[in-house]
């Protein structure tokens, strides 16, 4: 018999067998159950920004007050797991780096008046025009010059952050920073005369109370921050 015909007859017989079995209930499909071990998890996660900081690098070969951005800053972020209170830094912040010139011509010296003040000795809070709290200290910790005294001056001439060395006083040389201003200093500067006020602690520095001199020498070491 022809081989193709034999194959065809075999297929018909197979189809007929399945049909008969299905019709008389002899054929059934099995239900196969599977288990999914990858269960859905609800994670208590949140992200927080890590803000970048600004680093100041002083350069005494650059003109005082001149600024150059060396590195642009960018924020980082971290992930907080609220279930176990752990954190993971995903991206570190990159600090902004600014170079600031501090060079001042040695001839930047001025003769003028020096007095002392403490605006509100009986107040719970005493702040300068820049917001510095004199109740905490009449000193300021400068990144470059260290611990310096707080000064009040006409900021049209000596802008905030200016470092001044004061000499020719009865208590020696003083290094100060301009963080405050006052009407008397402004009026004096409008007449072309330098007048600065030195913040003092009335309780700890009684020998400085009411001090005044018209022969102080003010030498600018840095113009502003």
Image (cartoon, helix red, strand yellow):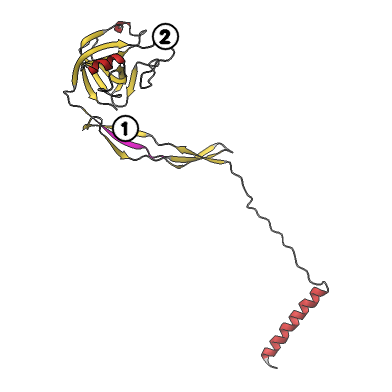
* Relative horizontal placement of residue 127, taking residue 197 as reference (left or right): right
Q: Residue at x 30, y 17 (%)?
A: 151
> Looking at the picture, how far across and down is residue 101, in whole percent?
24, 32
Q: Residues within 10 Å of mark 2 (few under 14, many from 20)?
A: few
Marks 2 and 1 in Cβ contact (< 8 Å): no
Q: CA distance from mark 2 to mark 1?
A: 36 Å
Residue at the (66%, 55%) spot, across then down: 36
Asked if residue 19 is positioned above or below residue 45 in the image, the reply reads below
Q: Nearer the viewer, mark 2 or mark 1?
A: 2
Q: In which quadrant of the rendered view does residue 109 lie?
A: top left
Looking at the rendered structure, the number of numbered marks drawn on it comes to 2
Residue 202, x across and y down, in percent:
35, 8
Instruction: State whether residue 45 is above or below residue 18.
Output: above
Farthest residue in the right direction? Answer: 24
- Numbered badge on residue 90: none
Dominant SS of magenta comes to strand
> Which of pointers 2 and 1 lies earlier in the amino acid sequence?
1
Say if the magenta span includes residue 123.
no
| Residue under label 2 | 122
Secondary element type, mark 1:
strand
Which of 211/184 is in front? Answer: 184
Magenta-drawn segment: 93-101
Q: Which residue is mark 1?
A: 56
Let me know if residue 100 is in the magenta part. Answer: yes
Residue at 74%, 63% in the rendered image: 31
User: Between residues 99 and 10, which one lies in front from this camera angle?
Assistant: 99
């Amino acid at each position: 018999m022809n081989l193709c015909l034999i194959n065809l007859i075999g297929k018909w017989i197979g189809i007929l067998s399945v049909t008969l079995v299905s019709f008389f209930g002899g054929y059934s499909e099995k239900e196969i159950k599977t288990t999914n071990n990858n269960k859905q998890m609800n994670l208590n996660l949140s992200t927080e920004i890590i803000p970048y900081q600004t680093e100041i690098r002083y350069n005494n070969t650059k003109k005082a007050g001149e600024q150059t951005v060396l590195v642009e800053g960018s924020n980082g972020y971290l992930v907080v797991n609220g279930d176990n209170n752990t954190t993971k830094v995903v991206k570190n912040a990159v600090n902004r780096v600014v170079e600031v010139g501090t060079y001042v011509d040695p001839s930047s010296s001025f003769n003028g008046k020096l007095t002392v003040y403490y605006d509100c000795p009986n107040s719970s809070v005493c702040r300068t025009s820049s917001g510095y709290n004199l109740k905490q200290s009449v000193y300021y910790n400068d990144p470059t010059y260290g611990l310096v005294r707080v000064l009040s001056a006409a900021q049209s001439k000596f802008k905030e952050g200016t470092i001044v060395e004061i000499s020719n006083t009865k208590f020696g040389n003083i290094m100060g920073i301009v963080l405050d201003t006052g009407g008397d200093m402004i009026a004096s500067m409008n007449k072309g005369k330098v007048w600065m006020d030195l913040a003092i602690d009335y309780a700890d520095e009684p020998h400085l109370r009411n001090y005044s001199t018209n022969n102080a020498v003010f030498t600018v070491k840095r113009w502003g921050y």
